[in-house]
Structures are given as structure tokens and as C-alpha cells.
Amino acid sequence: MASAFEIALMPENWANQYSGPLYQQLRDHLNEIIKSGGMQAGEPLPSEREIAEIADVSRITVRKAVQELVKQGLVVQKQGSGTTVAPQTQRVQQSLTRLTSFTEDMARRGMVVTSTFLEKGLFSPSPEEIMALGLTSGSLVARLSRLRKGNGKPLALERASLSPKYLSDPENVDASLYEHLERSGHKPCRAIQRISAMNLTGEDATLLDIEEGSAGLNIERVSYLPTGQVVEFTKSIYRGDAYDFVAELQIGDKGN
């Protein structure tokens, strides 16, 4: 007797329901099966040969579809143990219309926040930091690089740079940078943020505990004081499987 997964993979249950090349159609269908609970975290996928026979496609099509799922973080491939469904990380929604700290975001959701400092102190600035923060030649820059976790799960790498004029004691920052800045009267009130897609590799993938090539979000933010002066330049990397950024849009007075 065929399992529910095998029945869902039969061509009559997914063929022509998706667009794009055949491997993308298979990828999207497997994605839907996993996300709907058709397969549980840690459950092994059938072999390439078995999936190819059930779905009536080539093994090359199956291999490409599974590779896509690996990049999306939905399945994990390990030498000697095959392909299994990855543990599903709780997704976090962050507003794009409100400037908050990571600590505030997690606290509002009842999540326990922990941070591991990877770098903290005063350093010689890079050309990018000099431009972003308006630093003068020969000045230093305050840097805070942190691995941010929610309920013990690595979610983001955050690398903040500030002028020592606003953060002269980076070594004294414990948890929330914004709380520390608020005490000195230098908490930002607005920011401009740029978000782009990326694939995580190397040390970043290792620190975030995901497979190399998995999807991520690269976020650059420039934050301002009420006076209009730049106070913070931050480059962050978020796990693509853990974050949704949400913005409310309103139609103007003159609609199209």
C-alpha cells in the first residue's frame, strides 16, 4: 500500500499545477508537501531513484529539485545518512516601518534573546565605514559584531559600526546597543535600510548553523539622530528561513 507521500508524488497529483522547468515544478511540490506537514523534521526522503519512479521523472530532475530544497533550507544532505527534512525554524515577522532593536523584536514575541559577541572595541575604520559615518582621517570606529539567537536558535549576524563620538565605550555594551545609546542620549530615531538576497557561505553559514548555499538576507542600515546626523552603520545577515519582513503600503490620493 502506497504511503501518503508516495500518493502525493504521483504525476496526476502535481503535474501541470506549477510553472517553470520540470525540476522547479517538482521542487515546488516537494516544498508544499513538507511545509504542509506531509513530512516531519528528521524524516528521510526516499532515494532519488524511488522519487523518480513514483513521480515519473528522470533522476537528474529529482537531483536538481532536491538541491534547490537544500539551498532553501528545507532539507539537509549529509554524507552517509542521505537527505532528511530539516528542522523548521520559527519564522519571525519584522516590520519595515518601525525602527526597533533585535532585542525589542524578540522580547515582543516572548522569545529568549541571547547574543555572542564576535568582535567588540575600537578599530581603524574601513573606507566604507569612513564614508557611511562621516569619519575623519586618522579617527577610530566602534564596532560590535554579534551572533543573535532567539530561543537558542541562531537567527542573525549583526555587525554595527559607530563613531566613537556616540559610542566611546563599546566594551561596556552588554545586551541591547539601543538601550546603551539611549542612556547617553544617542539612540537613533529613524533609519534607511536596504535589503538584498544572498546565499550564505563560509563562516557565516557555519555561525548560523545552516548548509552552505542556503538563502539569506543581507541588510544594510544607516541610522540617524533627531539632528539628522548619522549615528550607526549596520550590516546584518539573516537566515532566509527564519525572517519575514512586512511593510504596510497605502495607495496615494491619485491612484493609477
Image: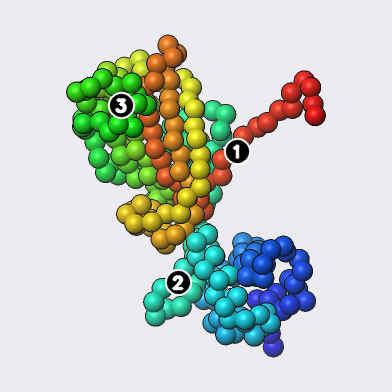
Q: Are marks 1 and 2 in contact (CB under 8 Å)?
A: no
Looking at the rendered structure, the kind of residue marked 2 is Gln
Eye-nearest disc, 3 or 1: 3
Looking at the rendered structure, the kind of residue marked 1 is Val
Closer to us: 27 or 154: 27
Is residue 157 depicted above or below 60 in this figure? above
Percent across and percent down for residue 194 are 50, 35
Color scheme of the displayed model = rainbow
The residue under the point 56% across, 34% down is: 95
Q: Which residue was labeled with disc 2?
A: 77
Q: Which residue was labeled with disc 1?
A: 246
Q: Which residue was labeled with disc 3?
A: 130
Rounded to the nearest angstrom, the CA distance separating label 3 from label 1 is: 31 Å
Per the image, label 1 sits on a secondary structure element best described as strand
Residue 237 bears which disc, if any? none
Is residue 232 depicted above or below 229 in this figure? below
The residue under the point 32% across, 54% down is: 203
Percent across and percent down for residue 25 are 67, 67
Residue 120: quadrant of the picture:
top left
The earlier-in-sequence mark between 1 and 2 is 2
Q: Is residue 233 left or right of residue 58?
A: left
Circle 1 packing at 10 Å, graded few (<14), some (14-19), many (20+), is few
Per the image, label 2 sits on a secondary structure element best described as strand
Percent across and percent down for residue 41 are 52, 67
Rounded to the nearest angstrom, the CA distance separating label 3 from label 2 is: 42 Å
The residue under the point 49% across, 32% down is: 193
**Quadrant of the snapshot with the N terminus:** bottom right
